Amino acid sequence: MIKEVKEKYVASIEKLELEREQTMLDPKFQEWMVNLGVSQSYEDISLRLNARDMMDYWGDNWTIIQSRN
């Protein structure tokens, strides 16, 4: 059961990342960013934060998962 939950969670994160990439590549979105005056050096840290959150979650729960197997 834990494996299925993990697979669904990872699949949902991958889906969100794909949607984000598609949005970022959309010319209308890029034009909107230019109109907002967002610097080209702007770095979106959400992926790093998401990765850290995932590692924190699975790191904390990995011991529990392993003890059940």
Image (cartoon, rainbow, N blue to C red):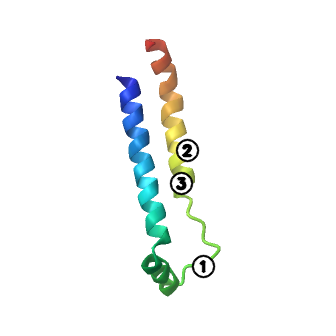
Q: Categorize mark 3 by other alpha carbons within 10 Å: few (<14), some (14-19), many (20+).
A: few
Marks 1 and 3, the one that precedes in the sequence: 1
Secondary structure of the residue carrying numbered label 1: loop
Q: CA distance from mark 2 to mark 1?
A: 25 Å
**Residue that label 3 marks:** 47
**Residue that label 2 marks:** 52
Picture residue at 48% right of the left edge, 83% below the top: 31
Q: On screen, 49 above or below 41?
A: above
Question: Residue 8 vs residue 44: left or right?
Answer: left
Q: Residue furthest bottom?
A: 35
Marks 2 and 3, the one that precedes in the sequence: 3
Secondary structure of the residue carrying numbered label 2: helix
Q: Quadrant of the N terminus?
A: top left
Q: Position of residue 22 (x, y in %)?
A: 45, 65
Picture residue at 36% right of the left edge, 29% below the top: 4
Q: Position of residue 29 (x, y in %)?
A: 44, 76
Q: Position of residue 47 (x, y in %)?
A: 53, 54
Task: Give amino acid for label 3.
Answer: Leu
Picture residue at 48% right of the left edge, 35% below the top: 57
Q: Residue furthest right?
A: 41
Toward which corner of the image does residue 16 lie, by quadrant? bottom left
Q: CA distance from mark 1 to mark 3?
A: 18 Å
**Residue that label 1 marks:** 39
**Mark count:** 3
Q: On screen, 27 above or below 15?
A: below
Q: On screen, 24 above or below 27?
A: above
